[in-house]
Amino acid sequence: MRIAWHHRTEAPIRPEGGRTDLIIEVEQLVKTYRSGGLQVQALRGVSLTVRRGEMLAIMGSSGSGKTTLLNCISGLDDYDAGSVRIAGVELATLSNKEKTTYRARNMGFVFQTYNLLPVLSAVENVELPLVVSGTDAREARERAMASLDRVGLADKAGSRPGQLSGGQRQRVTIARALVNEPDIVWADEPTGALDSRTANDIMELLEELNGDHGQTFVMVTHDAGIGARCDRLISMTDGVITSEESL
Amino acid sequence: MEELFGIPMDNIMLTLLALFGVSGLGVISIYVTNPVMFRMGVRNLRRRGLQSVLVVVGLMLATLITTAAFTTGDTVDHSISRAGYQQLQRSDLQLNFVGDTSMTNDIAVYFADSATEALDQRFTDGKLIDGFLPLLQEPVAVVNGRTGLSEPSIVLSGVDARRLDDLGGLRLVDGGTADVSALQPDEILLSKRAAESLDAVAGDVLTVSVNGTPSTVRVAGIVDDELASSGSRAFYEHGAGGGAMLLSSVQQMTGHAGQINRLTIALHGDVATSHERSDEAIDLIQPFLQSPEGAAVLGTTQPVVVEALKADAVAQAEQQGNLFTTFFLVLGLFSIAAGVMLIFMIFVMLAAERKAEIGMARAVGAQRANLMQSFIAEGMVYSLLAGAVGTAAGVIASLSLVSVFLKVAGGFDFIEPSITVRSLVISYCLGVVITFLTVTVSSYKVSRVNIVAAIRGTDEEPPRPRKRQVSWRWVAIGIPAMIVPPLGLWWMLRKGFGVPSAWVVAPVGVALGALSVLVADHADSQFLFSLGVSLVPLSVAVLAAHYEVSRRVTWTLVGAFLSAYWLAPISYDELIFGHALHGSMEMFLLSGIMVVVSFTLMIVFNAQLLTKLVQRGHTRRYTASAVLVTMTAAALASGFALGDRGNGLGQLLFLLAGVTGIGAAVALAAVRFPHLAPALKMGIAYPLSNRFRTGMTIAMFSLIVFSLATFGAINASFVSMMSADGGDGGWDVLVSANRNTVGGADLRSALVEEDAPIASSINAVGRTTIFTGRSTVRVANGADQAVALPVIAADDSFLSLPQGSLAGWANGYEDEQAVFDAVRTGSHLALVDRSVIADGFNDYDFTLKDLKIEDDRFDPVQLELFDAATGRSEVVTVIGVLGTQLEPTYTTGVYLNERDYRATFGQPDYLRTWVRLDDHTDPEQAAHAIEGALVRRGLQAESIDGLLEDAAAESNTFILMFQGFMGLGLLTGIAALGVIAFRSVVERRQQIGMLRAIGYQPGTVALSFMLESGFIALMGILSGVVGGMVIAHNLFSSGQFASSGAEFAIPWGEVLLIAGASFAMALLMTWWPSRQAAAVPVAEALRYE
């Protein structure tokens, strides 16, 4: 059964100041990891902006700070200095609980290792963000089905992650990331665990979703081919942005 | 305690020390031959301190249980022995003219006190025998003139002052020894118990009445209760104490000039060890006493034996201590079994955590045996630590249990803690060996890994079937190993011929099961029959699993079969063999294990059904709740409709309503609070995704709760029976007389003579005799030896009891009235009390195994009664069973009418009078009034309700202690949940990170972990409670207690307390790891591998 894509009826938490073109504004972001007596400066004053609807790739070698940057600007991790504004909201001013709620309503995440709950079916995994943000059960299920339909997996709604291929699992993850129609989708190596053909399929899907709905995609990758398919590409080395390229 | 299960404790200790040594040598050899693996294992202990602590706590529980069992046994043994020494002092032996004295202290035979001097001269040598102590002990009534308090029956003990002083004298309660020789003829050394009941102090003047004749005596001092001061032989004799006077004074007061009725013998040595030479002394003295010369010395023709008074008391103490230890160990087996499961689980989980390391070690060339060595080394260190902690904790637990339940709640003041090195060594070694063996087996399991999957952390693929190859080496090893058949078979068939494990296990299991069933009849063993019936389907299921038949279907069917077998109130052995097989405590254990196995299998293989409860459907989202609410209402309505009928079936329906009610509440919560639904579903789904781990934990909880609940129900059923109609046997007050009372045979007249108003409140009075010590009984035409059992004469009034006084009557008699009429007016007809029926775990010397009461009816049984004094015998037919629930001390025996009794046993001496009051009189107050009116006559009155309450309170004390002990096992289940919860947080760190990333608040993450533990605990608790209650119900409706007359009763308060406390503790244990889960840093968790 195909279920029509429903647009969200409930407005997400919106920042004060109304809609601007820039959805992410990062200034002089510093993050240092401390382990024992050792200090590792993962981000050394990173500044960047991302436009609404843009598809941005962050590239860099292992240890360059790209995942740390993504974690800090998505609110998953705290930073030591600098500022991050998402749609005009300064993340540092939000409490932990508010950040969590903000993520649930306005952000979607795609991880390299899928991170699906193995004991829940595909549709149950997809509807999780809606359920925690208090969406009505029936509506949550319908939207989850619609989201799965968007990624071409409506027929696998009842399957458990263990019964799906790697590509299908990543599609479920994408469906989950999109189900609450977030302003921003964060993707950390979304194709890292996939073969090249499946990776290509996934990228096509992301491009299509970005094109159709104008959602902002921030993607961390070390694959130049993937990076080249985005609107803009920034490269990082040792915690600083070393180059920026519009494609 | 010298023996356990018939095996000398020294042998047990040496065997365990040897096994401990072998285990230790094994580990030392690992250290010597492969120090790297040894270090790799041992260093793991320091890696996660908290987890190591938890592991030690988990591993120590089996040791804790065994230590507590042994220490309790030691304490009981030591305390009873010590009490025996204190009561008997230098009286090691005594002359017995009475016969069996186990049920009576009221029969006296008098003989010349000159015998003492003659025996003294003949036998006292200061090497084996230190002296003889003559006593004249008589029950008398006493009033304290100063306080006005009175006692109708204390023991006046006439002592030979010189001899008593020579043998140590009497101990003053304030310390020191009383100078008995300094006693004046009118002075008494009152025993502590008598002094307390009379509120007497030195200097008080007492009036002593013997046969109604008063004398005045002055209290010279207060001494301890012992044989010489109060006739008290053992701690359990609850008499009112007594007092010692000069022998000549007592002889004069009681009219027994020149006579004594007790002669004890002091052996050489101290109080605690002199009895060890009892046999030697008896062999020396008894032949003489039984010779004509001896009879002349004693001046009596009564047959006499020399009784090993103190040695018997010590043996009894040993027996009691042994009983406690055995009982605790048997009950503790549930906990020990759960503890073994926990050890296994802990090591499987430790291995799972180190899977990558194990894979890496294998990749670089470590053999599987090397990994086992590493685990065994680690396990041994854990075992040694856990053994020490467990032993210490067991001692503390035991001392707490004994102090709280026996000493404080039970009032057993004589209890004194005792710990023996031998018991500690046994407990420690047993704990270490059990842990070590379990670790070795689990090491074998966990060392088998797929190297690539282990390193990458991916799921393991099932091992590919290997081509079967014969290993003649293993065949050769297996043949001699057949001395231990399971090991030999495994090595030969599995390792040698490469036979699939299922084809080794299943045929052996089926063969063993079939063999057990076949020999069960011959061995008269219900245990073997039931074990066999249970083994067969389990074994077949192993084979089915090998051929990949649906595991869910297979194991669900096995679970259903086992449930049907164990829980249906059907005696399958009786159906097959035509008669019920014998079963005892071991059936309790087996039934518990099998019921738990069956429930656990059904739960873990039917996850889908349970998750439906919290499934958020769209159009039928209230369906599950509605169905469950309807079921709850139906069960409640049926329970109320059934009422008291069906032997407690209604209560089981209420229990079912409780279970479905919980399900309905969960389903409703999932619908009403949809944001909780995923947490609820994960709470069920995650545990069920690892059936082994979850099943083990559910089984642990279930086993312990099963044992607690079953015990609680059995106790509640018996206690409710005591307070039920008919429990009092149709009487309100028991009045006891003795040989020195006046008017004991005619209570009404005595009360009228004393102008006691209570006389007008008495509706009926019945009289019975007491045990003479000389009657023996056996089933007529049977091959068994006759054993001592009271034969009691009952007067016509006693044999006119109201309806409801009988627990059952013989077929052929219309009703109870017909039975009483027949016994009263007929001849050779008898009643028995309930204690002589084989029932429950009744372990008296004499039981009527063939008397089975069904629907209040039974087939009459013939008994042959003997009187050792007259040599006469009589055959009687038992046609009724008295329903009284009084302790057997008051009621046990065969009841005859007066004519039949006189024909065989002579003139009855009615010393017990049973009183029925009018409806408006309170029995307790009536007993006080009767005793108050007749105290000078020496009559003692007790309310029967009061006696029943005392018995129930005593039963409760022991049951509570047993439950407290078994409750220790709950720690096992709770520790298991803690281990699982900690482990889950580590295992699912990335998933926690993801949940937090997509918007789960920390509280919701914590809640989902709590729900998981809650689900496991709830399943274990519910299955344990339901299984325990159904088994208890069956015991009372058709099982071992069916003839007891007790109605099954669920102790609701206790069940709720057990279930609630277990659940709360389980959640508490998970609270910490849940908080850890909630506090996981999101970004760090998402990186975690």
Image (spheres, grey):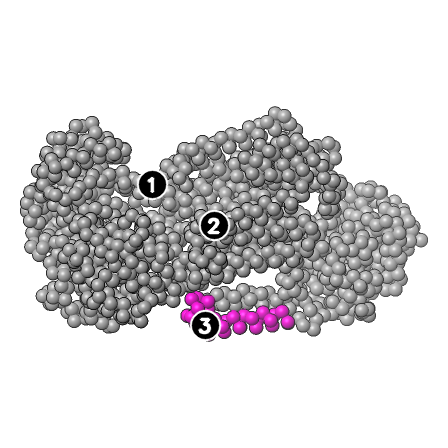
Rate crowding at label 1 as few (under 14), some (14 to 19) or many (20 or more) other CA atoms within 10 Å.
Answer: many
Q: Residue beneath label 2, please? A: B520
User: Which chain hosts label 1?
Assistant: B
Q: Are dots 2 and 3 on a single chain?
A: yes
Q: Residue beneath label 1, please? A: B318
Location of residue B880 in the rendering, given as x and y in whole percent from the top left corner: 29, 63
Q: Label 2 is placed on what type of residue?
A: Ala
Q: Which of marks 2 and 3 is nearer the N terminus?
A: 2
Which residues fall within the magenta stretch?
Answer: B622-650
Q: Which of these two is toward me, B792 or B447? A: B792
Q: Label 3 is placed on what type of residue?
A: Leu
Location of residue A88 in the rendering, given as x and y in whole percent from the top left corner: 79, 60
Quarter of image, res B561: bottom right
Q: Which of these two is toward me, B350 or B572? A: B572
Q: Element under label 2?
A: helix
User: Which chain hosts label 3?
Assistant: B
**Residue depicted at 48% across the width and 62% down the height:** B569
Q: Which quadrant, please, contains the C terminus of chain B?
A: top right
**B793 relative position to A34: left or right:** left
Location of residue B89 in the rendering, given as x and y in whole percent from the top left corner: 22, 38
Q: Which of marks 1 and 3 is nearer the N terminus?
A: 1
**B132 relative position to B806: left or right:** left
In the rendered structure, does residue B791 fall within the stretch colored magenta?
no
In the rendered structure, does residue B637 fall within the stretch colored magenta?
yes
